[in-house]
Amino acid sequence: MTPAAYPAGIRFENIEKRYGGLYALRRVSVEIAAGECVVLAGRNGSGKTTLLRIAARLVRPSSGSVTFVCDKENATEPASRVGFVAHATMVYDELTAEENLVLFARLLGISEPAARAAVLLEEVGLVERRSSLVRTFSRGMRQRMAIARALLNEPAILLLDEPATGLDQPAVSWLAGTLRQIRDAGRTIVMSLHGESEISSLATRAIQLEAGSVRADTRAGGSLSSILSFAGA
Amino acid sequence: MSLLSNAGALLGKELRTEFRSRELLTTTMVFILVIIVLFSFTFDPTSSESRRFGPGLLWLAFLFAASLMLQPCFLREQTNDTLSALRLSVDDPFAIFLAKLCANTLFLLFTELLMLPLFAVLYNVSILPAFHWLLLVLFLGSMGVSLAGTALSAISAQARMRELLLPLLLLPLLTPILVASTEVTVGLLDRNPYMQWKGVGFLATFDLVFLTVLWLFGEYLLEE
Amino acid sequence: MMWKRAIGGGAVLALVGMSAWANFFIAPTERTMGLIQRIFYFHAASAWAGMTAFSVCFVASLLYVWRRLQKWDSLAVSAAEVGLAFITVVLITGPIWAHPVWGIWWTWDARLTSTFVLWLLYLSYLLLRTLIEEPDRRALLSALFGIFAFLDVPLVFGAIRWWRTQHPAPVIMGGPGSGLEPTMRMVFFFSVFAMHALMALLIVERYQLEKLRTEFDVVRREAEAL
């Protein structure tokens, strides 16, 4: 796993998101440092997905701002490179694994898309199935595709929304191993999780959201396991 | 990276997907065929009547078929949330529209060109003398249908009853296309074919207006 | 506040009443068509008021897309509904006029046909709104459709006027060349003024209703979320 070229953190300032009068997020201000591996815990509807999607720039906050904070002095663009993994696989069923990655690599403006796709297929262990339609993949393999797609542009920050959903134990172990490598390469990880698992043990920090606000933060003295045990309860 | 190369890459994806399954093209063609045949039962297609009513029925068939063919356009991007993946990958969201626009225009044009000879045979009209002009009208008309249809497909994909909603929104909006295209086609299928440049200019204007609107407002259509 | 609305409402209704009276008693009887021609004052004035309402809807839609404030969405839907009501009046008074004069209920007169399409477009706009649950989505998507629809209107009128008036069809309101006798013209413009005043009143009232509805909706959704 190539080390992150420009480690970057995220600053959320007074993020608010309203859906027709209902608050999904209320004045959330969090600073995530470069290289941290953060778990977002909280019940369904606490705002985890919304916060992640705002960080990924898929959703516009009603007010407040998200900035990417880069440590490297003269780094400009790379700090904002973000990879996003969601519930859905975000790849095309009707294309092969290789075709999917080449397509997204081309869209991202990567100079040699085919080569990059090959590298990623190797990293996520899908080389043998490169020419199979994604439609034929199991849930675990789809998750690998999702990760591969998210890593195409060597993001400084990786965002994952409940990545372990629907995965069996071997797949969870594989995911934990992969995320460990990504973390150790210096990339920032923010992921929402339900409860403790092999994956949550990678965390260097945990933040609990409840009803759209930050309820607890290990950085502010909360305990990792107590935050995690609220998740999904 | 640039708008055009992104649109090109996505267009390739749209074409490849359709080429593999061919589901849109085949169902659209069959639907047009059914309408053309059914219409012929509603009046006796003698030559002169065909020349008067035929073009209108033809374009009506194209419009109905298009309103069905355009439904999956953005719906299929919802299944695996690939729309989010696209939004994350492209600089300018208009590239997504541009690609789908081109794809839809090509699909429509393709089915129309296949149906045209069939129409000529069933209704006893001659399409050969003015064929190159017919091509122009078909292109401009299909582009207009595609422009409005792609935009409205993005809207209806986010609403309930989308199967009924898209035709409902699209068909009144496309009245200008229907009228102008029909009129120009009538001229081209006449015993002494003539070209109505006013109609062509009008179609081009429609296309330009909606292309501009889509370019200005497209990203809002894709917002979450 | 209630005072102002009551007085305003009263004034508008008085205005409409005066206009109606003028339509029937001040305007001279038209030579060929007689009494029924007086419906023209309502018919044409309603058409103008309807178009103005749709213009308001267009501007409100643009403002919503730009600023995302709920009030623009409320204004847009209010204007669209009121506009649709006026256009319905146009479509009903058309046949009422046509039948005594020409013996047919409907004529594919260019303006009437275009108005019919206009009616369908804004009916679709309102229908679209009922099919989207989430208020912000509904506001944005209907604003965008409202923009498309309004920009389509001149194209509809243009196409139908250019290519669908070749057939010999009775022209409902007389072509652009048909002059109005001075008294008639005055009555007509007064009618237009009165209709616009009515339009403004209706939009304001509908807007207030919409404001209440959206507030109630927020409370209801918050309660459901608990």
Image (spheres, coloured by chain):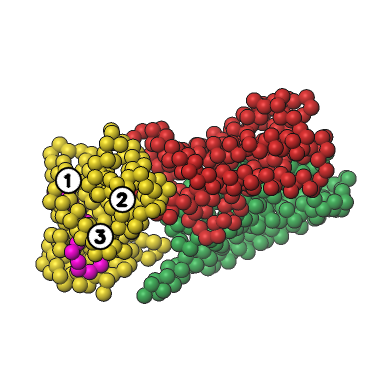
The residue stretch that appears in magenta? A186-200
Please tell me the colour of chain C.
green
Instruction: Tell me the CA gap for discs 2 and 3.
Output: 13 Å
Please tell me the colour of chain B.
red
The residue that label 1 is drawn on is A1
A16 left or right, relative to B153: left
* Same chain? Circles 2 and 1: yes
Residue drawn at point x = 40 percent, y = 50 percent? A93
* Same chain? Circles 3 and 1: yes
The residue that label 2 is drawn on is A145
Q: Earlier in the sequence, mark 2 or mark 1?
A: 1
Q: Is residue A100 magenta?
A: no
Quarter of the view holding residue C153:
top right
Q: Which chain's residue wears label 2?
A: A
A159 left or right, relative to C99: left
Q: Which mark is residue A134?
A: none
Relative to B123, is C78 above or below?
Answer: below
Under mark 3, the amino acid is: Ala
